[in-house]
Amino acid sequence: MLVSPEGKEYTYAFEFETTNNKAEYEALLTGLRIAADMKIEDLSIFVESQLVANQVQGLFEARQPMIKQYLEKTKELLRSFNSYTVEHVRRDQNKKPDALSKLASMTFLRLAKEVLVEVLPEKLIVQKEVADIIKEEGEN
């Protein structure tokens, strides 16, 4: 998920299976490519994986060959930005992207791959109020 300084959100999902850390790197690389294409110069990066955050910050080294490749590609893309920060975000503080990842993991065999979400500010049908009927004795 990319969020502009104005709060506009751009959401992307993956259709392939992968491990958590590889998925985190895939999301990071995709976001970096899009940010570079948009000519963004200063970037704040929030990742759910503390391992990935620490590897990108240079605090931890990558040991698995595939993760090393992800880290190298990430560092290569990061060089195209004037500045960037990388911050770990706990899953309970990352509810929207977490919900989107669960949605993306569902199988939509016959549905479009693009999911549009619209937030409705109010009900489309308003229930009419009915006044109480009072029955009086005698003439009225």
Image: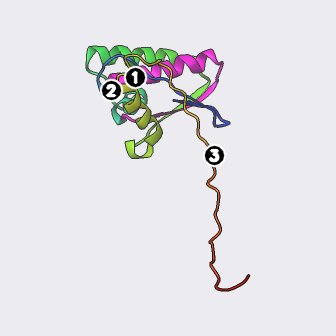
Mark drawn on residue 25? 1
Inter-mark Cα distance, 1 to 3: 35 Å
In this figure, which residue is indicated by the disc labeled 3? 121
Inter-mark Cα distance, 2 to 1: 6 Å
The image quadrant that residue 140 belongs to is: bottom right
Left or right of 38 in this view: 93: left
Q: Is residue 95 above or below residue 72?
A: below
Cβ atoms at labels 2 and 1 below 8 Å apart: yes
Question: Residue at image x 33%, y 32%?
Answer: 51
Q: Nearer the viewer, mark 3 or mark 2?
A: 3
In this figure, which residue is indicated by the disc labeled 2? 21
Cβ atoms at labels 1 and 3 below 8 Å apart: no
Q: Which residues are magenta?
A: 20-49
Please, what secondary structure does the residue beneath circle 3 have?
Answer: loop
Q: Position of residue 38 (x, y in %)?
A: 64, 18
Question: Residue at image x 59%, y 17%?
Answer: 36
Q: Nearer the viewer, mark 1 or mark 3?
A: 3
Please, what secondary structure does the residue beneath circle 2 have?
Answer: helix
Instruction: Please name the predominant secondary structure of the magenta segment in the image.
Output: helix
Earlier sequence position, callout 1 versus callout 3: 1
Q: Is residue 67 magenta?
A: no
